Amino acid sequence: MVDNTIISIRDVVKRFGSSVLAVNNVSLDIKQGEFFALLGPSGCGKTTLLRILAGFETPSEGQVLIDGDDMERVEPNKRPVNMVFQSYAVFPHMTVRQNVAYGLRVVGTPKPEIDQRVQESLSLVQLEELADRKPDELSGGQRQRVALARALVKHPKVLLLDEPLSALDAKLREQMQIELVHLQQTVGITFVIVTHDQNEALSMADRVAVMNGGNVLQVASPTELYEYPNCRFVADFIGKMNLFDGQVVGVKEGQVVVRADAITAHIGDISVPFGDEARGKVGIAIRPEKVKLDGEEPKDMPIRVRAKVVEVVYYGNESHVFLQSTSGAKITANIKNTSRNTHAGIVKGDQLWVSWCPQDTLVLTS
């Protein structure tokens, strides 16, 4: 079997002084040609880990291998990586063409090769017609493309991206997410992106590592992270989640029997599919889009709760309905607005039945 790992992070620890543990014993393998995301809140260690890959920080413990080579004594400019910073860091006094060519000129690349590679890079990011403009004549998205072209022109094995879309407005950010994925697929090299934006990570990455407090909590595909988070933090951080405290009171084959006072007072204990071992206190979770709302009691639904609508927020394509159950539990349901002339049809003060399928219910043991 061929090993296509391009980056191996082994037991990496990074301390700043005696009190700050920024990265805590992280081990990761990233594949050749993969679009990989490091996702988490501010201060979780994701940017520090990216800077360790780039060589701008030295790990306190552990080892980093890139394409099989130990990076311990390899300077940043000697590593087979290039980095695109949050600020883009383009030179304001140079044209687009000069910015892209800069790194090749510094290392003494022959001019004919520089011209050819710069033209190829500008073509990749669709900036050929803007090659002679200065950065202050470009939009934010165009300046970002300059930074990408300048990084790609050196033919790195790995491209590191530190919050590259954070300075863009929402619509342009969404457009650039699509363009980045297309660019990565075109050049076929490994992209590692740092982001705090869950939608950005889910929409672009092949796999995502969710970090918190310097730890990697879960590494998985976007679908697996969203549908099968392995702990409360990941469940709550990835998308919206209704989360209730529960207690395991029994185990069946492939199922656990759970008592959760916030949602089971009316129906009694519930059986939920769960393949792993669970005992004691657990979290019971359900995504808002999997919640159904009815005026009459849906007696065919094993999980159902009486609740009052406390707020309805309109978002155009959908409405978010915030409810409170008779036991005081807060529940959110997302309702699609499928017709121009209709809306959720639900108003503040409505008394409704909230229900969902056991198969859509998550049991979180940590």
Image (tube, rainbow, N blue to C red):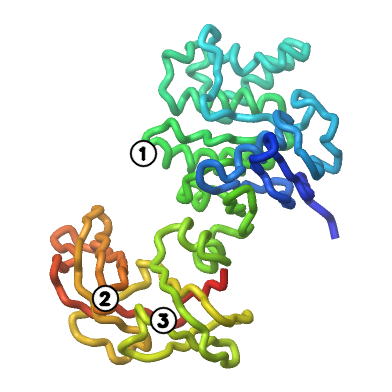
Q: Amino acid at mark 2?
A: Ser
Q: Earlier in the sequence, mark 2 or mark 1?
A: 1
Report the amino acid beneath label 1: Lys
Q: Nearer the viewer, residue 82 or 123?
A: 82
| Closer mark to the observer between disc 2 and disc 1 | 2
Badge 2: how crowded within 10 Å, few (<14), some, or many (20+)?
some
Tag nearer the camera, 3 or 1: 3
User: Residue beneath label 3, please?
Assistant: 260
Residue lying at 41% horizontally and 72% vertically, measured from the top left: 244
Instruction: Please tell me which residue is depicted at 61% across the width and 54% down the height of the picture.
Output: 207
Residue in the foreground of this view, choosing between 69 and 232: 232
Percent x, y of residue 60: 77, 39
Q: Quadrant of the N terminus?
A: bottom right
Answer whether residue 322 is visible to the viewer in this image.
yes
Who comes first in sequence, dot 3 or dot 1? 1
Q: Is residue 174 left or right of residue 180?
A: left
Residue indicated by mark 2: 325
The picture places residue 62, in percent across and down from the top left corner, at 80, 45
Q: Is residue 288 above or below residue 175?
A: below
Residue at image mark 1:
171
Mark 3: secondary structure: loop
Q: What amino acid is labelled 3 in the image?
A: Ala
